[in-house]
Amino acid sequence: MQRKFLIIDDHDNLSSGLKKVFHQLGHFVETIETRREAIELKEIDKFDVVITDLDNVDAIPEVVQSDEQNNDCLPEVETHKPSEHIRAFKICATNFNRENFDENELKNLFETILNYKAQFVDKIERMKNLREKIEFEFPSAISLMHSVLDYLTRRVEKIGVVDGDNSHLFIALDEAFVNAVKHGNKFNCEKNVRIAAEISKREARFTFEDEGEGFDVAAIPDPRDPENLFKTSGRGVLLIHNIMDEVHYNKRGNRLEMVKKTETQKADR
């Protein structure tokens, strides 16, 4: 099946290469340079996948768009300090055509995008005031876990939040991913998963959100209690709390926020 891609790239590092790759695979690709152009683009929901890679704070305007436009697939608008260098990268597949849904097809598309970006666009970051926003929105597909989480952990390591050799970050992200796809959305490909990361030199903030019914975090049995030693429930939540520095659930229980701080930040508290 031919897929339709929209690539928003203000520095052309990603769009030109991916356009060639996807054209060779028989897909349709449209490229534009700014978020504002995407806002003005009609029927953005006709694209199966929208990829945004912005390296210019001016490309993320702090204006409110018309309510008539469907901008869910674009990076969120936010205020920022003049001294901060903001980057925004997002893959949105919430409008992915799910007729005869093939999870492996979506997995291969995500791997192609992330491998290309990691190999030809990303680099070790030494900017003091860099803040990087990374977002993924996609149908519930457990097979996307490795490529998405591997990309996130590599960015956190390269920006300098954690030491890759001594970090258990991937384990916490793995638990959050599985909880969203398996326990939250119950593998229903008609429901979406949303993952967001905001990474700076001081910390990495992660949000995992599913479209399931949620759960009562307080009702989870404590796996450290002798009476629960042979129960499997609760161990993932305990792992997340042990690895991350901050963990918060919303009232419904379908949105998890986690923070991992640098050793310097933890020492300053």
Image: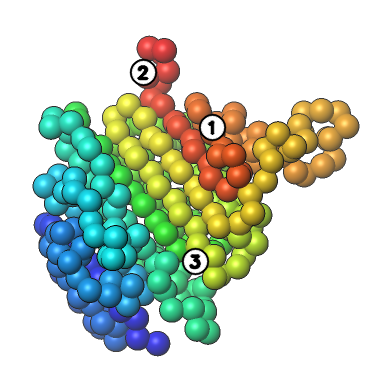
Q: Residue 221: x and y, percent?
A: 78, 36
Residue 118 showing in the rendered view:
no
Which quadrant would the C terminus be assigned to in this image? top left
- Decide if residue 83 is on the left or right side of residue 171: left
* Tag 3 near tag 1, CB within 8 Å: no
Residue 161 showing in the rendered view:
yes
Dot 3 falls on a residue whose secondary structure is strand
Q: Residue 207: x and y, percent?
A: 46, 43
Say which of 137 and 67 sits in front.
Answer: 67
Q: CA distance from mark 2 to mark 1?
A: 19 Å
Residue 218 falls in image quadrant: top right
Q: Residue at x 13, y 30 (%)?
A: 83
Dot 1 falls on a residue whose secondary structure is strand
Q: Residue at x 45, y 76 (%)?
A: 105
Q: Is residue 206 above or below residue 182?
A: above
Query: Tag 1 or tag 2, which sits nearer the N-term?
Result: 1
Q: Give the amino acid at mark 2.
A: Thr
Q: Count residues near mark 3 (Cα–Cα under 10 Å), then give few for <14, some for 14-19, many for 20+.
A: many
Q: Residue at x 45, y 63 (%)?
A: 138
- Judge depth for marks 2 and 1 and give the one in front: 1
Q: Give the amino acid at mark 1.
A: Val
Residue under label 2, please give it: 264
Residue under label 1, please give it: 247
Query: Tag 1 or tag 3, which sits nearer the N-term?
Result: 3
Q: Which mark is residue 139?
A: 3
Residue 237 falls in image quadrant: top right
- Judge depth for marks 2 and 3 and give the one in front: 3
Q: Is residue 90 above or below residue 169?
A: below
- Decide if residue 72 is on the left or right side of residue 82: right
- Decide if residue 110 is on the left or right side of residue 179: left
Q: Count residues near mark 2 (Cα–Cα under 10 Å), then give few for <14, some for 14-19, many for 20+.
A: few
